[in-house]
Amino acid sequence: MGIQLDSGPTVKRHNYQQNAEINITPFVDVILVLLIIFMVAAPLATVDVPVDLPSNASTPAPPPTEPVYISVQTDGSIFVQEQAVPLAQLAASTHGVTAGQLETRLFLRGDRTVEYGTLMQVMNVLQKAGYSRISLVATEELEF
């Protein structure tokens, strides 16, 4: 019996080519799972519960030297500082008090029983007049 020393041409064990393409299937799977989670969780984030908003537990910020207050009473009457103003004249009266400076911070105070829609009408009139720095005023929450 003879032994063959030359086995001939060498054979590669693996003949793999490099794949330069990115496999996006796992990425799409993760995105779809996240989409489903957000679709299920989004309706839970909106709550349709009546809320009594006028109290605030945080420490109040120091008021400016000359604050400009817009007040809305229960009956819907509007005041700029201490002067009664109809809703149609609100923008003009506010421009007069702020000297036309639209960067002035306005403090909007609403009575606890004022309808939310009335308060939003006042905010919309002020925003359309060019005021973007509108803060809502609340009383401090008392701790017992």
Image: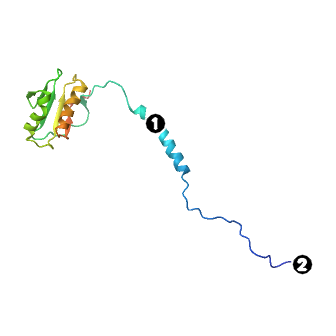
Crowding at mark 2 (Cα within 10 Å: few <14, some 14-19, many 20+): few
In this orientation, does residue 140 appear? no
Q: What element carries label 1?
A: helix
Percent position (x, y) of residue 36?
49, 38
Q: Name the residue under label 2.
A: 2
- Label 1 Cα crowd, 10 Å radius (few <14 / some 14-19 / many 20+): few
Q: In which quarter of the image is the C terminus?
A: top left
What kind of residue is marked 1?
Answer: Met
Residue 43 visible within the image: yes
Side of 67 relative to 32 (left or right):
left
Query: Under tag 2, what secondary structure?
Result: loop
Q: Position of residue 104 (x, y in %)?
A: 14, 42
Q: Name the residue under label 1.
A: 39
Relative side of 81 to 44, left or right: left
Name the residue at 89% across, 78% down.
Answer: 2
- Residue 135 in the image: x percent, y percent? 20, 36
Give the farthest residue toward the top: 75
